[in-house]
């Protein structure tokens, strides 16, 4: 009985390990204000639910990691910021 109680106690002390999924989205952005708009909308809609958000306007790519958000939720936030998500990389004109 003591071993079982000790085991349960130790399991409660060990934080649960979750593996975040990496997401990459192709989004046409013109400047730093565009990337800031996406970053701000993600913070407004999904604060604390992602890590490593990078909205790179020079490469037209948004990347982030999350173990709770779905692709659909992220796309919806990017679209709410006024941008369209492409399924393929965007040919750079910069």
Image: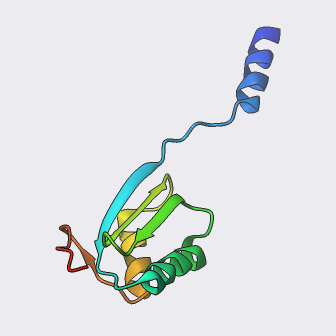
* Quadrant assignment, res 70: bottom left
Asked if residue 92 lies left or right of residue 38, the reply is left
Q: Residue at x 74, y 31 (%)?
A: 12
**Front residue (pair 91, 49):** 91
Q: Residue at x 29, y 80 (%)?
A: 28
Residue 88 position within the rendered picture, expressed as x and y whole percent measured from the top left: 18, 67
Reply above or below: 75 against 69: below
Reply above or below: 88 against 12: below
Residue 66 position within the rendered picture, expressed as x and y whole percent measured from the top left: 49, 55
Where, quadrant-wise, is the C terminus in this rendering? bottom left
Residue 5 position within the rendered picture, expressed as x and y whole percent measured from the top left: 79, 18
**Front residue (pair 52, 4):** 52
Asked if residue 62 lies left or right of residue 91, the reply is right
**Residue 1 visible to an observer of this rendering:** no
Q: How is the image coloured?
A: rainbow
Asked if residue 13 lies left or right of residue 46, the reply is right
**Residue 5 visible to an observer of this rendering:** yes
Asked if residue 81 lies left or right of residue 91, the reply is right
Reply above or below: 22 against 72: above
* Quadrant assignment, res 18: top right
Reply above or below: 42 against 21: below
Where, quadrant-wise, is the N terminus in this rendering? top right
Residue 51 position within the rendered picture, expressed as x and y whole percent measured from the top left: 54, 57
Q: Residue at x 20, y 80 (%)?
A: 93
Tell which residue pokes out farthest to the front in this image.
Answer: 94
Q: Residue at x 47, y 55 (%)?
A: 65
**Front residue (pair 41, 27):** 27
Tell which residue pokes out farthest to the right in this image.
Answer: 2
* Quadrant assignment, res 75: bottom left
């Amino acid at each position: 009985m003591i071993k079982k109680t000790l085991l349960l106690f130790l399991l409660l002390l060990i934080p649960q390990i979750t593996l975040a999924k990496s997401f990459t989205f192709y989004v046409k952005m013109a400047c730093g204000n565009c990337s800031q708009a996406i970053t701000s909308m993600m913070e407004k809609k999904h604060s604390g639910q992602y890590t490593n958000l990078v909205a790179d306007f020079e490469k037209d790519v948004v990347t982030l990691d999350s173990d709770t958000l779905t692709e659909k939720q992220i796309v919806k936030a990017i679209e709410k910021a006024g941008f369209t998500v492409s399924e393929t990389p965007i040919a750079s004109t910069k």
